[in-house]
Amino acid sequence: MELIHSILVAPFIEMVAYPDFFLQVVWEGFVAGVLYSLIALGFVLIYKASGVFNFAQGIMVVFAALALVSLHAMGVPAWLAVLLSLGIMGLLAVGIERLVLRKLVNQHDAILLMATIGLTLVLKGVGQLVFGGEPKPMITEQLGLPTGSTDWEVFDGIVIFQHIDIAAAVIAVLMVMALGVFFSKTRIGRALRAVADDHQAALSVGISLHQIWAIVWFASGIVALVTGIMWGARSEVSFALEIIALKALAVLILGGFTSIPGAIVGGLMIGVGEKLFEVYWGALFGSGVEAWFAYVLALIFLLFRPQGLFGERIIERV
Amino acid sequence: MSKTTLFTLAAGVLAASCLVPVAQAQDSMYMPSMTYRTGPFAGGGTPFADGYADYFNMLNERDGGINGVKIVVDECETAYNTQKGVECYESTKGNGALAYSPLSTGITLALIPKAPVDEIPIFSMGYGLSAAAAGEQFPWTFVYPASYWNQLSSILKYIDSNGGIKDKKIGFIYLDAGYGKEPIPLLDQLSESMGFSVAKFPVGVKEMQNQGSQWLNVRKERPDWMIMWGWGAMNPTAIKEAAKIRFPLDRFIGNWWAGSHNDLKAVGAAGKGYLAANFSGIGQDYPAVQDILTHVVEKGMSKVASADDVGNVLYNRGMFNAVVLAEAIRVAQDKTGKSVITGADMRDGLEAINLTEERLTELGLPGFTGEVKGSCSDHEGGGSVFIQQWTGSDWEKVSDLIAPMTDVVRPMLEEAAEAYVSDKPDWKGQTCS
Amino acid sequence: MLYREAGQFKTSYAADQALMPITQDRVGLLVILVVTFVVIPVFATDFFIGSIMIPFLVFALAAIGLNILTGYAGQLSLGTGAFMGVGAYSCYKLATIFPDINIIVLILVSGVFSALVGVLFGLPSLRIKGLYLAITTLAAQFFLEWCFIRIAWLYNYNDSGAIEVPQRKLFDIAITGASATPTVRYLIIAGLVAVLTLVAANVLRGRIGRSWMMIRDMDIAAELMGIRPLYAKLSAFAFSSYYCGVAGALMVFMWLGSAEVEAFDINHSFLVLFMVIIGGMGSLVGCFMGAAFIWVLPIIIRAVPQMLGLDILAATTEHIANIIIGVLIIFFLIVEPHGLARLWQIGKEKLRTWPFPYAST
């Protein structure tokens, strides 16, 4: 009886009793969700266009952020460092397309996934060899990102909004909008959608697959850089960041591999869900439930909808 | 080159590396150094390894070794990974290794049972298994200058002397792994005897950089003080999150692995006021550190990125690890009369170590740390910690040395040591008169 | 010339269906067994046995486990580390609850627990497929890791949170614990791995194994032909997890001597997966080749600068090892997606036709 009470009643009483705190939890979850969405977005872009499940997205986040802070440490001004790191991600995209993807056309999903796992190892080694393995602080102020916080007094308490978190949310929204415009209004964007729909049909109307692939990898490189800056500002830039990217996999399951809105909704669901669960129910399980909550949620969800929230319906024929 | 030649070459290298023992000159002593300059914890491993190697190299350059015998420092990269650490141990133990400092709780636990068999002592300086401080049960393991439990008791004493601890609520945020959970039994026990309450906040190894929920819970629980058992990327993230929820940072104490320059570099001025325990002196103002600068760093023999890194918290701690080992070698040489000693001699040397303030001054480290005196039964040496505070750009010592509550901790250590050996019928301890 | 089956006539169906129909293969196997059980224990150094052969065999067994699931039954799994953990933790619990039962028996029994957990986490495979399933196995990985930390009963409430191997004897010879010599531990592992590999080889070519391969190649078609996906998939999960569990128990009891949760983390799962990829999906020989490749290659890379007298930082060689393995994985996928095992097979084909490569076979 007591157990049922502590699962079904007590948390809600607590939520109502301290609404300011509840709002804070939701806000924190929202911000974490936005950051998960950003990582997931990188995955979706690549998966949509090339059918590659890019396991290296996490290490690309680290790599981009490391390139940025290392360039800045060498005395390059912040704005130029951003441009140069974008250049590096561009080169990486072209290199990956030339050396890996082009040779693996038409291979099975799992083989492409494994190629990106190999890529992860290469990037990990190169990154540590070139930039050094020790963690580095993110150059938040030099990039002109806001620090500090704003209080919102509500329900006899306060909710604290960090400016950097607000900035993260705004940038994420802008980025999704920019991608939306890019996909629907530009020539390359339309070509991208054509490739995502049907490789062969796209080829037959004269779209270059190689070019499109390099572009999507570059686009997800940009997303990786932004993600790296935002996560780096929350803690530091280190190779431990790579692990967080795994959580984006759960986001993908919820949202479906091919849907950009899915990545965002999935990210927010997991961000808010895991914060609420950890804060209000975590203690019942001995805390630390965040480590698996996202995956288990995704698993349960999949049992009812195997293609994810916004995924395309899977039709199988013999 | 054809595939066959490549294969033959590889096979040859493999065979040569495994079957031929490394030739060992008799005029040197072999000191393995397990490092982790790679992986998620590299930020802490790199300065530590630098300090360790530089001190031995300094002895070689300045004095021509220890009593005329040069020390060969051989690095083996573990990446903080237990399998690789065990492999490092197995591959180097045959070279006449004198002692191992595994630098990770996991590797330490794997090596503890091997030490008596191979007769090479384990020196886990302020980490590893707290119970190893009981020399009767663990003749081959040393945790100078203090175990985690002693450290925790010193931190609690500091809190007690700064506004009292009775009826206060202490929050304990820790890495959710063996390392972070180690002090919990003592914390629970002391909370009863000292009359404070405890709230625990575990941080998963994969959630180190994502601590939003833990700090929301801190805000909910409203503890008076926070104690952190953190490592690597967890530390700067925690301090940033604490500042975010406006937790007073001068009531937030990290343990000695959560208070280095590397941790606070990413936080900067926002971390002003944060406290941490430490047992090794800070800065370059020690004659021994100056000697390292002259004899090693300026000659370009060090691996430090810049000379400014010499003297930071973890560099000096790595150096202190080497200081204790070098001192143990000297003691062992005196005791045995040999100039080249063995692992077993080294054990006796470690056990008979006596680093008084006087001796530390002779070594060029006046006021560097508290006195460390080992004995047959005491393998932690009763070292004390001090509390340091982050000024926004550097660490500053803010307390005197705080002695641990040995009277409470010691019986618990012995009990834990008993429990450790209880299911190992052939475990060899030693009797101390 | 030497490797050719000409002249070997089969006179019964049994001979024709034998595991190794060609005499040369049988001789080769015999040589390998002699080297494994006689030459290496007698002549090799402790380091070679303890740090190369033991880990190699443990990983080979884990790779067999994963290969059954991924290579033969087509269910991609990223949870190998956790299933190995289940084996290790249950073996530890069994060893403390039943101290009198022989540890080898306990190691084999602990695989059963792993198999049960594997079946449980295999249930979603009935509805979820492909990459989606791979990610749900991550749920198993992280949830089980969390259990290993949070359920203190699993490690007998000790303060360090790690499992430590008690000393056990067989015929008065220490076989676990620090005083057990590498040679003894090696012989036990080699024996178990040999037996389990033989079992796997027979199961895989039997009815169950063939049903797994049908599911892998096309599950709907297999279902139409009377294979029940429920049994086929879950039995694949059970078998696979059993092998992984035994490998995990061996890893802790016969190799490391103690383990924290980190020993079974996601990176461990990936390591085994790399072995399967490099060795070759759907090949038992490949498991051994892949394990040798992934485990031994970094050791060689680390030894090379030392041999050549170069003063390279240990960390640098580590990075270089990472890059080389990564490049090799990609290289293999491009050149030979079927791994080392396929190269081996091609080599055998070439040998058969040598010195007349154009002769039709």
Image (cartoon, coloured by chain):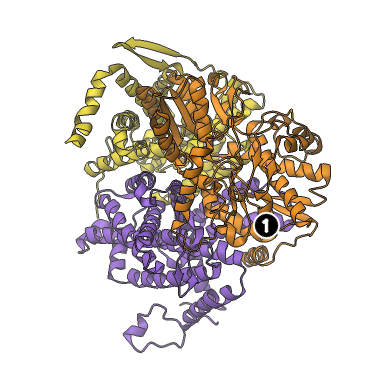
Q: What number of labels is visible?
A: 1
Q: Residue A212 in the image: x percent, y percent?
A: 45, 36
Q: Is residue B82 above or below residue A40?
A: below
Q: Is residue C292 among the parts visible in the rendering? A: yes
Q: Is residue C328 among the parts visible in the rendering? A: no
Q: Colour of chain B?
A: orange
Quarter holding the N terminus of chain A is top left
Q: Residue at x 52, y 71 (%)?
A: C184
> Which of these two is toward me, C185 or C139?
C185
Q: Residue at x 81, y 49 (%)?
A: B67
Q: Is residue A191 above or below residue A173?
A: below
> Which of these two is toward me, C158 or A252?
C158
Which amino acid type is shown beneath numbered disc 1? Gly
Q: Residue B401 in the image: x percent, y percent?
A: 61, 29
Q: Is residue B408 above or below residue B83?
A: above
Quarter holding the C terminus of chain A is bottom left
Q: Residue under label 1, please give it.
A: B343
Q: Residues within 10 Å of mark 1 (few under 14, many from 20)?
A: many
| Chain of the residue where label 1 is placed in the rendered structure | B
Element assignment for label 1: helix
Q: Determine the residue located farthest toward the left in the rendered image.
A: A1
Q: Residue at x 28, y 18 (%)?
A: A18
Q: Residue at x 53, y 43 (%)?
A: A98
> Which of these two is toward me, A293 or B176?
B176
Q: Colour of chain C?
A: purple
> Which chain wears yellow?
A
Residue C169 appears left or right of B429: left
Task: Kindly indicate the quadrant of the structure image that contains residue A311.
Answer: top left
Q: Residue A86 in the image: x percent, y percent?
A: 55, 29
Residue A244 appears left or right of C307: left
Q: Residue A208 in the image: x percent, y percent?
A: 46, 39
